[in-house]
Image (cartoon, rainbow, N blue to C red):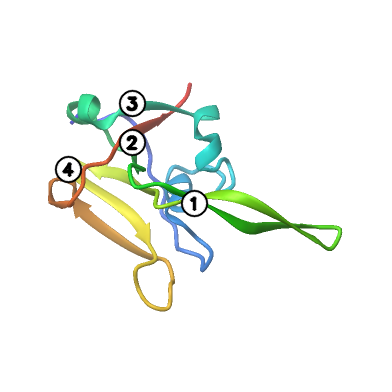
Amino acid sequence: MSKENIQLFDLSLNKGDTCLTYVLKRLGLEEDLCSYETLHDHFDQFQFSRYKKKLSVGDILLWDRDIKWEWMPWIIKDKNIIWKNIPLGVHFGIMEDDDLFSDCTRLIKPPHPSLRIRRLNEVHKNPDWVLKLSK
């Protein structure tokens, strides 16, 4: 793995953190920089299967092959609820070093964000995409 000069930032989780806000904060970016729908405005996207030998610290991993879209009440404006089609089943992680990546998950009950560090070769499904901040 190439060692680019990317600095990962220390952080502590907030109750509202998601896997996406976690990776953005780990890169020192604003946690509201983007959503799943607007990733392409800020990141270059590469197929994991073609990029896996070029991974470097700070690369964002994205799993979205199991994505489902669900209409949910998402916005309140002038006392009206507005529904939005929301992506479910996507997950983000970030490369830490060598084959280690970290992520934030809500697998505990009741759902609350918690951190993990794992080896990439130990996950059940490979990521679908690698995201790099656009220059």
Q: Position of residue 24 (x, y in %)?
A: 47, 45
- Sequence-earlier tag: 3 or 1: 1
> Disc 3 marks which residue?
46
- Sequence-earlier tag: 3 or 2: 3
Relative to the observer, which residue lies in front, 130 or 135? 130
How far is mark 3 from mark 2, CA to CA?
10 Å
Count of numbered badges drawn on the protein: 4
How far is mark 1 from mark 2, CA to CA?
15 Å
Relative to the observer, which residue lies in front, 58 or 81? 81
Q: Which mark is residue 59?
A: 2
- Sequence-earlier tag: 4 or 1: 1
Badge nearest the viewer, 4 or 3: 3
Confirm or deny contact between disc 4 and disc 1 (CB under 8 A).
no
Badge nearest the viewer, 3 or 1: 3
* Amino acid type, mark 2: Asp
> Disc 1 marks which residue?
21
**Would residue 14 be found to the left or right of residue 82 on screen?**
left
> Tag 4: Cα neighbours inside 10 Å, few (<14), some, or many (≥20)?
some
Placement of 82 over or under 49, stated as above or below: below
**Would residue 124 be found to the left or right of residue 5 on screen?**
left
Which element is circle 3 on? Answer: strand
Confirm or deny contact between disc 3 and disc 1 (CB under 8 A).
no
* Amino acid type, mark 3: Phe
Instruction: Tell me what residue is drawn at x 84 percent, y 63 percent.
Output: 79
Q: Position of residue 54 (x, y in %)?
A: 22, 26
Which element is circle 4 on? Answer: loop
> Disc 4 marks which residue?
99
> Tag 3: Cα neighbours inside 10 Å, few (<14), some, or many (≥20)?
some
* Amino acid type, mark 1: Thr
Which element is circle 1 on? Answer: helix
Instruction: Tell me what residue is drawn at x 42 percent, y 78 percent.
Output: 110
Instruction: Tell me what residue is drawn at x 38 percent, y 78 percent.
Output: 109
